[in-house]
Image (cartoon, helix red, strand yellow):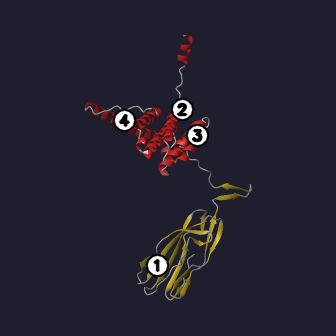
Amino acid sequence: MNVLNIILSIVVTATLDSTQLMIGDQCDLRLQATTDKTEQVQFPVYGEELIPGIEIVDRTMVDTTSLKDGRLQLTQYLTVTSFKDSLFLIDPLVFTSGDDSFPTEPLSLNVIQPFEIDTAQNAITDIKPVYRAPIWWWGILRWVLLGLLIAGHAVGGWYLYKWIMKRKAMKKGEYVEPEAKRPAEEVAIEKLDKIREEKIWQQGRQKDYHTELTDVVREYIAERYNISSQEQTSSEILEDIRPVLQMRRDLYDSLKRMLSLADLVKFAKWNPLPDENEQSLRSAYEFVRETTPVPEENPDENSEKTEE
């Protein structure tokens, strides 16, 4: 495996640390040049493969060592592997110095499969039986329980902190019990009543009037149907709410007229008639009231009423 080439005081060698390799295993190819200090030696340069079928997975920098006779020894290691079952013949590796070339002798590498052939049965059998590692259930369970314990402490600590802060606020008289969330229809009707009382369209503020009116309807649709209406255009709102109102075409058409008129006023500086302003408000009231969920009656109460 070792080759010496002595020309112009330069000696080059190429050595594999193994001539036989299991598929997927690795071995080192040592490239070495011994030269005088006055000579400049260039090592062979390779990309990702040494030859087709043999891959280079790692390489070292060229290391320089001073010998006792004053000469220099240059060494580089290439780590190679192969995933093909074959006997590879590697052509000479060529070092250069100036215009001169210094080839090594050819190398060979035999890559084999990790099994043997049973000639008696003419079948392939594994060298070693497959080892099935036992599942360490207690180790897994221990980590799961530890995670649950940490999560439980975190949640418990948060609620404890909130309780302590609440107690402190109550002692100082600063705690205010959060209000229960009001029904969407109740909030919408209240805001529509306010718009009706302010009468801002009668003051010439047409754009403000229709903006406030459509904002109320948008907020109601977002709360009632979980539609992101506040971030949508009028056409997108109508597209999303069409399936909801498929049995109430009258409400859909009324909502469409109200939103279309509002867009004309806001973006086209349209000046609607007084009746159109009033109709938009009536349409908003009608839409909220007609889509308000009807509370279910208690069967026991119904039976009591029947008996009476």
Quadrant in which the C terminus appears = top right
Q: Amino acid at mark 3?
A: Asp
Q: Helix or strand or loop: what does disc 2 sit on?
A: helix
Q: Which residue is pictured at 56% across the width and 11% down the height?
A: 307
Point out the tag, 1 or 4, that comes first from the N-terminus.
1
Could you say which disc has been placed on residue 253 in the image? 3
| Residue 200 percent coordinates (x, y) | 41, 41
Return the disc, 3 or 2, that comes first in the chain's sequence.
3
N-term mark: 4 or 3 = 4
Instruction: Kindly identify the residue that appears in the image at 55 percent across and 85 percent down.
Output: 101
Q: Are marks 1 and 4 in contact (CB under 8 Å)?
A: no
Q: Earlier in the sequence, mark 1 or mark 2?
A: 1
Q: Are marks 3 and 1 in contact (CB under 8 Å)?
A: no
Check disc 2 and report the residue beneath it.
290
Report the amino acid beneath label 1.
Leu
How many other residues sit within 10 Å of disc 1, few (<14), some (14-19) or many (≥20)? some
Label 3 element class: helix
The alpha-carbon separation of the residues under discs 2 and 4 comes to 41 Å
Disc 1 versus disc 2: nearer the observer = 2
Q: Distance of mark 3 from mark 1, alpha carbons?
A: 88 Å
CB under 8 Å between discs 1 and 2: no
Q: Position of residue 297 (x, y in %)?
A: 53, 22
The residue that label 4 is drawn on is 159
Q: Which residue is painted at 43% across and 83% down in the image?
A: 71
Gap in angstroms between the C-alphas marked 1 and 2: 91 Å
- For mark 1, give the secondary structure: strand
User: Alpha carbon of mark 1 to alpha carbon of mark 4: how far?
Assistant: 69 Å
